[in-house]
Amino acid sequence: EAQVTQNPRYLITVTGKKLTVTCSQNMNHEYMSWYRQDPGLGLRQIYYSMNVEVTDKGDVPEGYKVSRKEKRNFPLILESPSPNQTSLYFCASSFGTPITDTQYFGPGTRLTVL
Amino acid sequence: GEDVEQSLFLSVREGDSSVINCTYTDSSSTYLYWYKQEPGAGLQLLTYIFSNMDMKQDQRLTVLLNKKDKHLSLRIADTQTGDSAIYFCAESMDAGKSTFGDGTTLTVKP
């Protein structure tokens, strides 16, 4: 089944404790992206990747890192999480860029930073 | 910067049509999308329209695009309770970047 998976789905952590949210897609998509969803702010793009070893900042990259060492995986890294990073995070992928192709979204990861 | 705006709430009766509206600011948008998010779930692509189109119809869904006014709408015919969800409008213009609206919560009453 073609899908985008994220792990964990739910996470509660404390300020400053490094964490990684994994994202994996099995559709051989070149483009992958991370978003956060906050009440009243909609979805905002954090980082995106056009292909392996190519990553770019979205609208809200501060406090996050990503890597794209292989095509199927695009982990989101929070080196020192803070409470303002409490949010619902979505990973998405598409074969081409959003200009030429439509994105498929993962189920979301709800992160709480205490 | 670019903004995508939507009204936050819409309530309709089952069987009526729903119209969800969206405005965007960047006239260079190439694709405009509608996504649906059900409670506790991720985003599901409903439909999209190229910026050189005025209308697209897909079963119960009709998308209208007014480029002059930078206005996008999604019409759902014969709305059902299963259509209750949050609907997001989104646009893409730069390679790789997408901008989403805040979402419209559609409530369908029996």
Image (cartoon, rainbow, N blue to C red):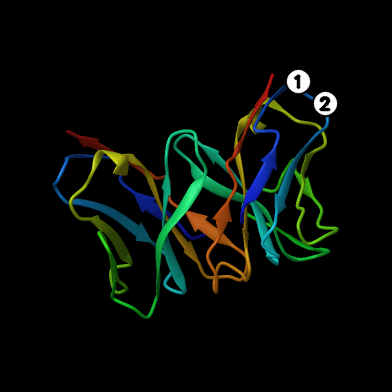
Q: Are marks 1 and 2 in contact (CB under 8 Å)?
A: yes
For this orientation, the residue located farthest to the bottom is B52
Query: Can the viewer see residue B72 in this picture?
Result: yes
Check disc 1 and report its element: helix, strand or loop. Answer: loop
The image quadrant that residue B70 belongs to is bottom left
On screen, residue A59 above or below A9:
below
Tell me if residue B29 can be seen: no
Residue drawn at the location 34% of the way across and 49% of the way down: B6
Q: Quadrant of residue B97?
A: bottom right
**Going by the image, does A77 lie left or right of B37?**
right
Query: Left or right: A95 with respect to A13?
Result: left
Tag of residue A14? 1
Residue located 48% across and 41% down the image: A41
Dot 1 amino acid type? Val
Q: Residues within 10 Å of mark 2 (few under 14, many from 20)?
A: few
What residue does disc 2 label? A17
**What kind of residue is marked 2?**
Lys
Q: Badge 1 sits on which subunit?
A: A
A111 vs B93, left or right, is: right
